[in-house]
Amino acid sequence: MSERIYMSSPDVTQREEDAVVAAMRSGWIAPLGPDVDAFERELAERVGVDHGVALSSGTAALHLGLITLGVRPGDVVVTSTMTFAATTNAIVYTGAEPYFVDADLATGNMNPELLRRALERLRENGERVAAIVPVDLLGKAVDYTAIEAIAAEFEVPVLADAAESLGATHRGRAAGSFGRASIVSFNGNKIMTTSGGGMLLTDDGRFAQHVRYLATQARQPVVHYEHTDVGYNYRMSNLLAALGRAQLSRLDEMIARRREMREEYKRLFAGVAGVEVFGAEGDDADNVWLTSIIVDSDAAGWTPQQLATALAEDDIESRPLWKPMHRQPVFEKYRGEIDGSSERLFERGLTLPSGSALTGAQRERVLGAISSFVATR
Ligand SMILES: *Cc1c(COP(=O)(O)O)cnc(C)c1O
């Protein structure tokens, strides 16, 4: 049997290995050091904001971003239902109540009309909405033009979950630069990785300073460890920041590799009835982190599950799109503006191998397996 092909494996080279070894030899083996500082500067510059705070995960960045926005127990935070659980988890950590907004069918991103309806309803109820957390799904930035305008109208700050969209843009502006602050993730399966890590990005120096303070156990600047706030141990290790810097230097090349695979999928499915490559329209602004297809089973004559089973037999990983948060047993008690779009995407979608580390032979194996599945239907 040939080796297993994953959806999105880490893409590391000699450059990453050299960077980690150099950091280790430098003696900075701590959650601070010159690589942390440089990584923050380099990523902030890449995204076009003034400040970055490197953290232990994207989830930690969301958590501290929400606290710094003043989100408290009893508040409501409006967020996308079509996302990975980390977004909702971070809201629940603060004691606030998540309020879900359904997706736009073409992109899976937060539907601005439903966001407006949510904010109107919550205002009528007299509830305090402390933040809006939109999610850039699978590497496509949300419609920040619409969402930031609505947020401004209702005077609610935006914390942008750009965990999946580093390298993407909206109207020429980089994902990670929107809202009062944005967060990105460097988990092992993301577009670039530090094995685990994240960063909060913002133009607001005081915001960044407060996040950095909370992330280092909220130590007052005195020698005897004085504390006036509950702190967290959320900083990124210097070794991992070195890995991140090497990955950042290869980000564009990795995006280009993912885009090549996206184009292969577009060619393959162009002639297949009932199948569209998800979010393909206008995807030149995306980082094309993951490529998914949406299958109309009546027109195609097969279901996404059947394709997934066939691929699994060839040891090729595929997965449904994120199961919407309002359908998750742990979160289904929360309210939302739900119109069925995200459930429809969940039922019809399948995410295919998309990683930049896929070799030519692996790509051919995946495309061949899909082609022969489609040909026998
Ligand atoms: C991966 C991800 C996160 C969490 O990032 P971690 O670094 O894994 O904690 C948050 N939101 C979204 C949308 C993600 O895909």
Image: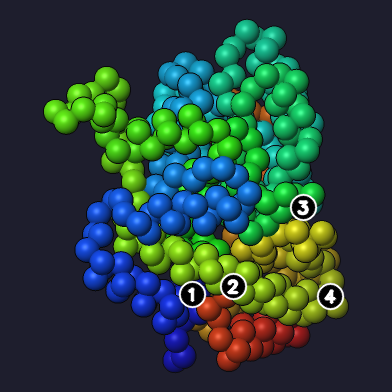
Q: Earlier in the sequence, mark 4 or mark 1?
A: 1
Using the image, determine if residue 134 lies above or below residue 291. Answer: above
Q: Which amino acid, by three-letter code, is at mark 1?
A: Asp
- Please identify, in this view, whether the residue under mark 3 or under mark 2 is nearer the observer: 3
Q: Could you tell me residue 135's position as x and y percent?
A: 62, 44
Q: Residue 142: which quarter of the image?
A: top right
Q: Which residue is mark 1?
A: 11
Q: Which residue is mark 2?
A: 254
Q: Secondary structure at mark 2?
A: helix
Residue 134 visible in the snapshot: no
Q: Could you tell me residue 223's position as x and y percent?
A: 16, 31
Q: Earlier in the sequence, mark 2 or mark 4?
A: 2
Location of the N terminus (image quadrant): bottom left
Which label number is shown at residue 172? 3
Using the image, determine if residue 237 lies above or below residue 303. Answer: above
Q: Secondary structure at mark 3?
A: loop
Between the C-alphas of marks 4 and 3, the distance is 28 Å
State if disc 2 and disc 1 touch (CB < 8 Å). yes
Q: Secondary structure at mark 1?
A: loop
State if disc 1 and disc 4 touch (CB < 8 Å). no
Seen at 41% across and 74% down, the residue is 16
Between the C-alphas of marks 4 and 1, the distance is 28 Å
Q: Which residue is mark 4?
A: 270
